[in-house]
Image (cartoon, rainbow, N blue to C red):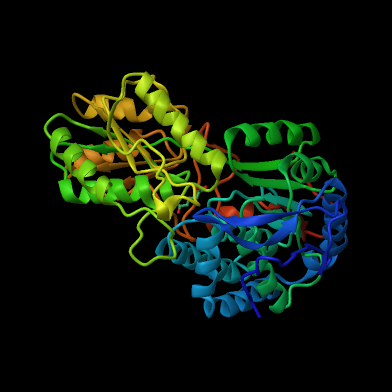
Amino acid sequence: MLQIPRGDERRQNLIGGQWVAPSTEKYEPCLNPADTREVLGHFPRSGAADAKAAVDAAAKAFAGWAATPPPERGRVLGRAHALLKGKVDLLAEALCREEGKVFGEARGEILKGLNLLEYYAGEGFRTHGKTLPSEARSTLTMTLRQPVGPVALITPWNFPFAIPVWKTAPALVAGCTAVLKPASLTPVCTHLFAEALIEAGLPPGVLNIVTGAGGSVGDALVDDPRIRAISFTGSNEVGLRLYQRAAGRGVKVTLEMGGKNPVVVLDDADLDLAAEGILQGAFGSTGQRCTATSRVVATPAIVPKLTEALVEKARKIRVGNGMSKDVQMGPAVDQSQLETDLEAIAAARSEGARLLCGGERLSSEEHRNGFFCAPTVFDEVEPGTRLARDEVFGPVLAIQSARDFEEALALANDVQYGLTASIYTRDFFAALRFVEKAEVGMVHVNQPTVGGEAQLPFGGIKATGVGEKEMAEEGANFFTHLKTVWLDYTGARRTTNIY
Ligand code: UN1
């Protein structure tokens, strides 16, 4: 029976199929960032000993789970999907209240997580290697996919349901056991997901959950010699530190980190379509999305009208508690993220960008108990300034002008990140040239920069991504290694030298 935790409720870590108290005996409250008087339970602030106990459980469960036929592993995910499908509104409410995104967006995230569960449930039937020809006669050569072992999954606060699902489901269907560390700020949806998996018949120890700080729990997981792969989504700073630690042990890592995603708008674009898409990308999820639109690069004939439309619409966005029906944008996730947003705004002003709307914390009666920043738009954002290059992870949009398509493309690529990019144009040739030349892992034409689909590989290049893409077949492949097999059925001494 899934329920959103009550304020005074204590949740525990999931280790070896049991909910157990942390060795530290410490807990921290999960607060609603739209109204911090609202508490969604208290969650363990665990330590390294709890991480170790979780790895013990994952290591113990590995042989049995790896030997379970893949279709059977997939069926567990399928049953969890069936259970959660009837709970979309409850899950969306939990998500809205723990992370702050508005109810409609929260619902969208839950549905996306469910699509991923559905997809990976079927992947149990499709996990495959290849048969390939051999140089030798009467020899069958092929590859087998085998689970790498127990793995660590470290997830961020901004997609508290979809990202835990998109790492856990492929790991489990691939035959790995896992220790999942959700972000300390947003553990609720992860717990509800785990409860559904248990009810669906997931054997003890196959998925373990430990909440706590990255510095203690995360590092203990990354350093544990039994953890054979690590999947991380979060900041560049943490991701790269984790990568260095993991490199010392030579284990597989996939990192999905920052973005500074541009939307290029050419003179011939459909203005309304472009404005809508940009607003959705920039202010949806309060801009707290690695795929968020943080830059607009537009050519001369469309810049004035586009800017006017964006500012007019941004001013009208209703900001507030995402559980209220007419609210369109929620809060920053916590005080620290709000400060980051306000610092980025101050830096942009001091570097000469022109503030067109927003730019401040909202502090009226309905905003007083949350971390609300107004939707903010700047133009005259010079290349090389912080707002042109650094990820904010908040509702702050930078508009830049470009002479023509070539300059727009150059500006679009002029950042360290490479997650996603979009172009609005009716010019087929410009669109395809952008698809070819945009230095990103995912590109959209006449669409916002955000989003992803279960069956489509997700991830970035340059400073955004390391390792295999997530979701789709690639997402499950990361959790396997490929074994190459020669089966010789000549029954005689070999004459062909295959070496
Ligand atoms: C989306 O845009 O729907 O952390 C997904 C993030 C990304 C997920 C974005 N890993 O924002």
Place of residue 8 in the rendered image (x, y in percent of width and height, measured from the top left) = 70, 66
**The C terminus, quarter of image:** top right
Position of 431 relative to 53 (above/below): above
Position of 405 relative to 72 (above/below): above
The answer to whether any part of residue 132 appears in the image is: no
Q: Is 299 positioned to the left or the right of 14 in the image?
A: left
Give me the residue at 72% from left, 42% from top.
Answer: 214
- The residue most toward the front is 365
Place of residue 481 in the rendered image (x, y in percent of width and height, measured from the top left) = 71, 50
Q: Is 128 positioned to the left or the right of 293 in the image?
A: right
Place of residue 169 in the rendered image (x, y in percent of width and height, measured from the top left) = 63, 63
Camera-side residue of 381 and 24: 24
Give me the residue at 84% from left, 61% from top.
Answer: 21
The answer to whether any part of residue 243 appears in the image is: yes
Camera-side residue of 313 and 15: 313
Place of residue 27 in the rendered image (x, y in percent of width and height, measured from the top left) = 76, 55
Give me the residue at 38% from left, 25% from top.
Answer: 348
Camera-side residue of 326 and 361: 361
Q: Is 331 positioned to the left or the right of 481 in the image?
A: left
Position of 210 relative to 111 (above/below): above
Give me the residue at 61% from left, 63% from top.
Answer: 189
Which quadrant of the structure image shows residue 476?
Answer: bottom right
Q: Is 294 positioned to the left or the right of 419 in the image?
A: left
Camera-side residue of 3 and 121: 3
